[in-house]
Image: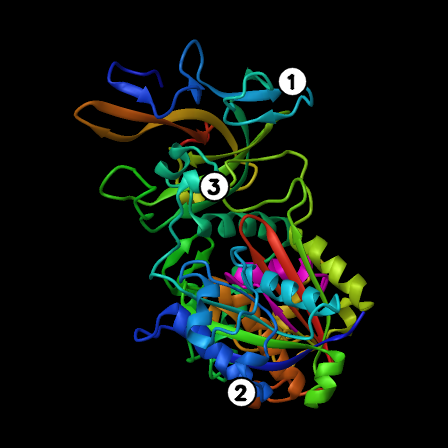
Amino acid sequence: MLAVVNERPIAADLFTLAPDLRLIGGRNRQSGRIVFPLPSDRESFERVELPHRGPLWSYTVQRFEPKSPPYFGEKPFQPFAVGYIELPGALIVESRLIDVRFDELHIGMPMELTTFALRSDEHGAALMFAFRPQAGNRP
Amino acid sequence: MTQVYIVGIGIHPFGRTEERTGLEQGAFAVRAALADAGLEWDRMQFAFGGSDAAGKADTLVTELGLTTLPFINVLNGCATGGAALFGAYSAIKSGEFDLGVAMGFDKHPRGAFASRPEDWGLPAWYGEAGMMITTQFFAMKLQRYMKLHGISEMTLARVAEKAYRNGAHAEHAWRRSPVDVETILNSQMVNDPLTKFMFCSPSEGGVALILASETKARELGRTNVRLRAVAVRSRPAGSFEVFSPTLELERGPAPTVIASRAVFEMAGLGPEDIDVAQLQDTDSGAEIMHMAENGFCADGEQERWLAEGRSRLDGQLPINTDGGCLACGEPIGASGLRQVYENVVQLRGAGGARQVPRRVRAAYSHVYGAPGVSAAVILVC
């Protein structure tokens, strides 16, 4: 999904939209360890793009509306899926899961990076990263 | 080094007590523990205490008496009680003091705990997107564990059923009516696979324990319950904790595994020597996973344990004999000390309808809290 004029990432340096959608992580210049999100300390961490595909590591469904703050999602609340996705050679990242039926979620399910509008108002939409089943596995 | 004894215990009933603040419930528990020990507040040489959300423990001196004792505040999430006990135990074991208090209390608003990303060094988007929710963590740790080790939803329901059955016999418990497995399985889904009756709720309550050196315990004629070992450990690399936007590919053990090994080594005992255990049961799945993390069974064996009733009051290792967090709710600052209170009750043989039928000589308790702290305690008589 590419951004339209009034859509903007929810935070700077979280993901790139072009040329490809990728999460932005950091690689520790000394240990080589990968972290996400990219720390502000650029002397210790260099910017790296993370793999955008990997298997679902675990998951659940958020059935009740989280307290606000800190939650700031679309109203009215609809249950949503969250999970951890194993990004090979990098790390395991927590994410909202979209475009999937709750009863089809399973550990090992092949997932890929996407985005969605977490909330929108007259000024535009806040884009959040998410993972969805890889093509062929979507409803 | 001296041995450390528990010479008095006191509890303010858990649940909801509209007319008392958390601090008042803490003071109530301290007075009850002093009465149990036959002592006055002015004999106390120190206190360790804490609450997560109901005020500063050390202000209790206003209520209990301005005796100038050192009163140390403790704040370690759900492991606060374990940390307070560790402080009190160490103070006496060192020989510096011979009589003091470990206490904790709390009073939380209804509903799931709300946390602010900035308090945890996390970006705002993590909370805005609805991922900063403790119950999601418990569900996701469990979901993977169930898949890897073949744990069924029925087993989760059996844990909760046992909790409410035991809680019905505990005067200090909040939920005191049995609930059957069908009701538990069919109750509202909160975070899959955990339903409403499989989760504990934030609640209120207070607990206090009076600790004494061997000399002092003999003077008081109270040498029946000894604190054999206390271990508190924070998380090692690769553990899976609440509020983690990422995890490392290389997985490591939980802090509970480390604390448990340490406490058994200190006590010179093994899991097979334990007669009763109180394990952190924030949800049904937590009790299941903590059975293995504390060394009482291998991963996956819980399925058979629960089906055969091995952790019931009359089983080979009764677990959470007062209904645990599921039946008592969770006042964060008091929860870990409630477990020790319950173990003292069991060691004294004073459990009434929930008393473990066989002789109790060694009792184990375990609390776990965010962001990855575990405390394990072994009592013997």
In the figure, B292 relative to B346: above or below?
A: above
| Res B195 seen here | yes
Q: Position of residue B311 (x, y in %)?
A: 63, 73
Mark seen at residue B368 = none
Camera-nearest label, 2 or 1: 2
> The disc numbered 3 marks a residue on which chain?
B
Mark seen at residue A29 = 1
Report helix, strand or loop for mark 1. loop
Q: Examine the structure image and report whether residue B250 is included in the region drawn in magenta.
A: no
The answer to whether tags 2 and 3 share a subunit is yes
* Residue segment shown in magenta: B277-297
In the figure, A136 relative to B63: above or below?
A: above
Q: Examine the structure image and report whether residue B291 is included in the region drawn in magenta.
A: yes
Q: In terms of image quadrants, where is residue A44? A: top right
> The disc numbered 2 marks a residue on which chain?
B
Look at mark 2 in the image and give the residue it sits on: B35
Mark seen at residue B120 = 3
| Crowdedness near tag 3: few (<14), some (14–19) or many (≥20) residues, C-alpha within 10 Å | few
Q: In terms of image quadrants, where is residue B205? A: bottom left
The quadrant of the image that shows the C terminus of chain B is bottom right
| Crowdedness near tag 2: few (<14), some (14–19) or many (≥20) residues, C-alpha within 10 Å | some
C-alpha separation, residue under disc 2 versus residue under disc 1 = 61 Å
